[in-house]
Image (tube, helix red, strand yellow):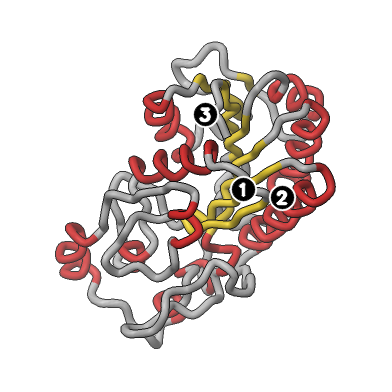
Amino acid sequence: MPAPRTVLLTGAAGGLGTLMRSLLPEYGYTLRLFDMRPVEGEPDAITADLGDRQALREAVRGVDAVLHLAGISLEAPFEKILKANIEGTYNLYEAAREEGVPRIVFASSNHAVGFTPAPRAGEPLIPVDTPRRPDTFYGLSKSFGEDLAQLYWDKHGLETVSVRIGSCFPEPTGVRMLSVWMSPADGARLFHAALTAEGVGHTVVHGSSANTRLWWDLTSARALGYEPRDDSEPYAEKLIAEQGELDPENPAHSHLGGHFVNDPPIWPY
């Protein structure tokens, strides 16, 4: 696929959206910004809710692709998840279909497979086709998004790369995160690959850096042209000294979804 010129970035005011606003233009993209909150320093950003179908239709009109990061990113009551992550994602796909947008890059999550046991030393990495085992309503909404993406590819020819993001922060903040961390620079590399790879249909990929302690297989991401350059290992000694090694008897340590499996953080809004 030729490099898209204009990409709609939903969730532009969020943590990951803010990182990508500064990194993706280096790849030649013009970003059209969308968020339910004003985007600081961006007076031309579209301020609207994912429930506003008309605003979404206007937002996607004329773009070459969508990077969909918007929605609730922690656990919340099902009614909130339903509105923001399930109905909101459906509204976006409908708008993209109506306006002929050829590709969406969908921010899925490790929490779509959060109850998957983390591999122990010597065990194979978790494959991308592992059965989905969501750990929360949030993870369930990401499973829905992947299925929605498959439906819109099969039925309407709208391509999607669903990126099961681990944790994308400037540096890892916990010992578990050493295994699923994606540096912001690698995040931009992966999103760029997902926006430009040929013939993706609906492809699911794991989103992380090339970590020494990696838990999941990056083969399908690399097949898009993704070449991760970072590794969480330089942060390991300090984090382990502060927090200790992972305890295999602790469900928050022994599952891919971490503490989402037993004590998920709650969306504050």
Instruction: Report helix, strand or loop for mark 2.
Output: helix
Q: CA distance from mark 1 to mark 3?
A: 14 Å
Q: Residue beneath label 1, please?
A: 200
Q: Mark 2, residues whose alpha carbon is within 10 Å: few (<14), some, or many (≥20)?
A: many
Q: Is residue 239 left or right of residue 8?
A: left
Question: Where the N terminus falls, by quadrant?
Answer: top right
Q: Is residue 95 left or right of residue 17?
A: right
Mark 1 and mark 3 lie on one chain; the one further toward the N terminus is 3
Labelled pair 2, 1 in contact (Cβ < 8 Å):
no
Q: Residue at x 56, y 27 (%)?
A: 4
Say if 241 sits above or below 32 in the image.
Answer: below
Q: Is residue 137 left or right of residue 197?
A: right
Q: Is residue 251 left or right of residue 66?
A: left
Q: Residue beneath label 2, please?
A: 149
Q: Mark 3, residues whose alpha carbon is within 10 Å: few (<14), some, or many (≥20)?
A: some
Q: Residue at x 20, y 64 (%)?
A: 236
Q: Residue beneath label 3, please?
A: 3
Instruction: Report helix, strand or loop for mark 3.
Output: loop
Say if 215 sits above or below 68 in the image.
Answer: below
Q: Residue at x 45, y 62 (%)?
A: 219
Q: In this rendering, does residue 62 appear at all?
A: yes
